[in-house]
Image: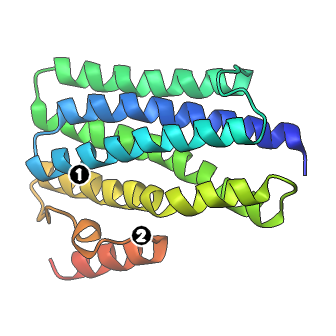
Amino acid sequence: MKSSQLKELLLQSLQQELGGVKVYQAAIGCAVNQGLKAEWQKYLEQTTKHVDVLTKLCKKVGINPDEQTPGRQVVGFLGDSLVKAMEMAGQAGDPAAAEIVAAECVVLAETKDHADWELLGRWSVNGGDDADAVKAAYDEIEDEEDEHLYHTKGWCRELWLQSLGLPAVLPPPEEVRKVTTAIGAAKAEAESLANR
């Protein structure tokens, strides 16, 4: 395995989590639904913990967690752009629309975050000297990342349906069923849509 690419993935993952803290802070400010606001508050706390886990992991495997790479800078720029998008939506004067924008921004952020953790998990199975440390971090975080992505995708879909005047289920079925897999999310969504 290329250690330089593992280093890059770890630094991008750390930057993604740092940006995730900002994304959740902005999203909470846009949330209208109290259940969603509480959900994102929980995710903010978990994301803050993820920053700590990745910072410690970087140090454990001999990577300076403050090192900047071009890829890390791009990840930081994208995170800042999501925050700016939510700020713009909030200033437009339509709280329900801003809440949807926030949900979309969280889904975008969590898609990259989820992909990073999947890659770290796969590397830890096939990796080298640092595989055990990476695997321990992955095992601690992965279920939370699944929840963040699949539950927020459900919230986003249902908020859009509600805004379109279509039947919506809030909280979404992914939240009610506490799904943590893509299959579970797909089943929850399909059953919910079939019953409307």
* 124 displayed left or right of 163: right
Q: Please give the residue where the numbered disc 2 appears in the rendered image.
A: 180
Q: How is the rendered protein coloured?
A: rainbow
Q: Please give the residue where the numbered disc 1 appears in the rendered image.
A: 39
First along the sequence among labels 2 and 1: 1
Q: Nearer the viewer, residue 74 or 37?
A: 37
Identify which residue is drawn at 27% across, 34% down. Answer: 27
Mark 2, secondary structure of its residue: loop
Judge whether residue 108 can be spotted in this image: no
Q: Position of residue 143 (x, y in %)?
A: 46, 64
Establish if 72 lies above or below 43.
above
Judge whether residue 124 can be spotted in this image: yes
Mark 1, secondary structure of its residue: helix
* 55 displayed left or right of 181: right
* 141 displayed left or right of 61: left
Q: Position of residue 62 (x, y in %)?
A: 78, 35
